[in-house]
Image (cartoon, grey):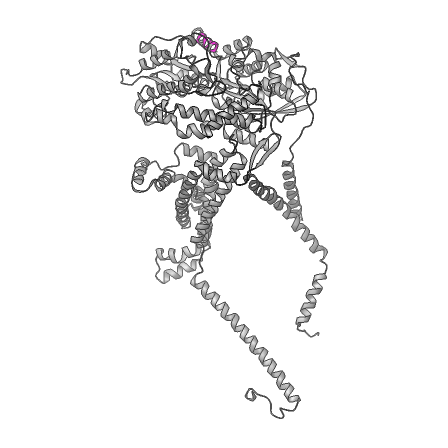
Amino acid sequence: MKKKILALVLAALMLMSVLAACNNGDGGGSGSGATTVSNEYEEVEINGWKYKKATDMTTENITLSVHSFDQQQVDELLAKRFMEIYPNIKVTVSYAAVGDDYTNALAAMVQNKTTPDVIMYSDADYALSNGLLLDISSFYNSDNETKNLADTVNSAGLGTFNLDGGQRYGVPFKFFPGIVFIDRNVLKTLNISIPNQQWSWSDMIDIIKQATGHTDIDGMKYYGLGWYNRLDSYYGVATGQDVIGEFGFNGKTFDVTKWAVGKQEFADLLVGDYAAPQRETDANEAWTGDWELWFGQTGHVAVFSEAFWTFQSSWNAPAFLEANPGLDIVPYVIPAVSEADAGAAHHSIATIDYGGVSSGTKYPREAYELLKFMSFGIDGWHTRNEIFADPNNVNASGVPLKNDVMPVPITKDQTIWDEYIKLYCEGMDEEHTQLWRDYFASCMQPISYGWTNIAGYWNFCDEYFNKVDIHTQTETGAAKAADFIDEINRQANYYHAKAMIDYFGPNSIYKVLTEDETKFYQDIVTAFES
Amino acid sequence: MEETKKMTRADKKALKEKMKHLKSGKLEKRDGRMGYFFMIPWFIGVAVFLAYPLGTSIWYSVNNIRSTPQGLLTTFVGTGNFSNILLQDPDFLVELVDYVTSTILSVPIIVVFALIIAMMLNMKIKAKGFFRLIFFLPVIIVSGPILGMLTEEGAGSISAIDMNALTTAISGVLPKMLADPISDLFNNMITTLWYSGVQILIFLSGLQKIDKSMYEAAKIDGGSGWECFWKITLPNIKPLILLNVVYTVIFISSNSQNPIIGLIQSSMLSGTKERGYGYAAAMAWLYTVVVLLIVGLFALLLMTRKGAYEKQVKKAKKAKKQEARNRKKIERRNARNAKRIERQRAKGKITSRTTSREDY
């Protein structure tokens, strides 16, 4: 009898769990219904900082959800602070590592009709083709804080997809500026003059060439360049202020003519043996005696095209500094190609991941405020600085969050920047702090990588560019970059035009293209297909 | 004492009719209800997790699907997804050919390796349980992401083999279509052999069921170990070979390391208008058909043919049945004859003599 009862209970539990899984957990409510930001706030003081609590938000008890691939612990702490400011709003955070895991999780939530209110995205094509993003232009344009963001967010329309109607579907969520590192000790050893922040592209190439070919007393070779990011990605944006995307994108079309010059230059550097071997290669083992040693640690490489985050997460860590006392790695803005641009703040490619409000949210105003708090908002950034300043805030591996992932503020608010630089340069001498200050002042004209910000770009890379493997062909000397110009332009413009029609055209989910835009893009598609 | 009465055909029919209208008892009814109740989770499971997704994926495969926060947007495209995959998607067919070749090559290797290890584990060795655990461990540990990480670190290949030399040698002898999968097979030899944990267990259970007296008898007759393997072991575990082959094909086909699975997944999440869930579903169905064809091919090759002994048994059973039928026939004829004699005696045609077989 006992067995029967146990079996009955188990069967009933299983049935209930199946039925419970089918519940989509609708919370009800409708939010404030505001369609703009009133810019009216009341102050809420937490830990000595006066937070601006928006008065045009709902007073109902609601739940907002965020799906992110930002740093998990930071997101959770940000959500916690947001809930302190708005006690009536409960924020749930779901996290997945960027890539297929993230998109799979998002796809599952969308299909289960539990789309999060705030979404991060790196693959714009997936988000747009499924109509995941809400047009937040009315909130963004009426919000005073958006006037003081990094220049290109507004001038190059980052997150807007450059529609004539002025719609905006995303805002920069996580910003890592482009950067070039120089090991000053290498330049000093080789008696090469150290550049300033106004250096030009040709200055950089000269340094790379001058530094290559020397050997030290033990016969170990010096290299001018150590690369992680390809220089052609940098070059394509550094060619001029009219370029607002990869491959010479001007907002409507691509022209890779100038990019191809940079591609060929980079390929020539590789073929000409100006670049240090990559890790885990036979060449690296032959050069350093260590299969895994990173080139920068040798003290024999002058210029690194490494990612911004590597400095704080690796090279600025006490253990690394102690183990590598012979290095003096300092930051430089990616140089502009023309001397005129190089002398002033100029566009440079940057890693920017975007966030948007879900088109399925019931609380657009509240979701926008949460998005702003977690991405570019001043209050959110003060909270981030507070989180990074506390060494007790650690990731799952016990690493302080400051040394895990520490993005850069997208706001230009001076208070936030003073806090940030103080925190970032903690432990540095005045000279290095000033170098970082100069760098940060020069990197605030970021241009995104294409897949996050240009419709059709991901599909173009996936279905054409990477398949043809233009990088390998040029970098092995098998072909010249100039050979591909016409076909890349044709393909890139087609994919972009087709995506614009598919995502925003008359038969799309959004239906926001003007007649002129539709005709413009349709002509490109027709020309390609004929 | 009541005399036992043999039931006539009419009685049996009447009883059957009566049983039809007979109501079940309370206990029987309760047992019936409980049976259905305990089957409910299974029915729900099949309906929700098998029948519904299966039906949905068929529907998806003939539609273009966009999954928006407001719900699914479907546009009927008929066979459009299938024709796009077969005629315009170069990746799918290339990956499919690679998959078919590598599966046909690696399945026999995995199964033979599993059989050899199972036979070794079935021997009288010390710490048998430990070794069984060692060979089964990859099944538990080597799940998708871990396997991916190990493969990236080069743990999937035998480091002692010079892969470059081997690949060059293979490419020199075989056409590219065959050389590539064979090179890949050698390159991922460790991974391939890790896939054999479950198959080893299945073979082991089969080997343990073989009657030891058969080996003893064979040895008395002078049979060697080699002969015992071919004449006793292999015929006895033959059905398990097919089972293991089917299992291996399905395992390889649904493994997350399989590039086609990756291709289906990336199509599902693609932003291209023609792709998405519908395209991925069509791709998955085409892939399923190919997987079934491979399973069918192996089944045709390995389907157990009836052995000589089984044939003899069947023949003997048939003969026995025939004999029983003949006996009944004779009994019926005797009974008919007896009745006829009775009738003739009653009419006075047969008088004094006792009837005997000679009268007929």
Q: Position of residue B59 (x, y in %)?
A: 57, 41
Q: Is residue A34 left or right of residue B327?
A: right
- Magenta stretch encompasses residue A434: yes
Residue at position x 47%, y 67% in the image? B315
Q: Is residue A457 left or right of residue B221?
A: right
Residue at position x 59%, y 12% in the image? A145
The residue closer to the viewer here, B222 or A442, is: A442
- Whether residue B76 appears in this view of the structure is yes
Residue at position x 60%, y 15% in the image? A141
Question: Which secondary structure type mostly characterizes the magenta part of the structure?
Answer: helix
Q: Position of residue B32 (x, y in %)?
A: 67, 53
The residue closer to the viewer here, A25 or B141, is: A25
- Identify the image quadrant of residue A108: top right
Q: What range of the chain is rendered magenta?
A: A433-441
The residue closer to the viewer here, B116 or B36, is: B36
Q: Is residue A201 left or right of residue A50?
A: left
Q: Is residue A301 above or below residue B143?
A: above
- Identify the image quadrant of residue A182: top left
In the current view of this chain or complex, which residue is farthest to the bottom?
B352
Q: Position of residue A195 (x, y in %)?
A: 38, 8
- Magenta stretch encompasses residue A49: no
- Identify the image quadrant of residue B238: bottom left
Q: Is residue A162 left or right of residue A311?
A: right
Q: How many marks?
A: 0
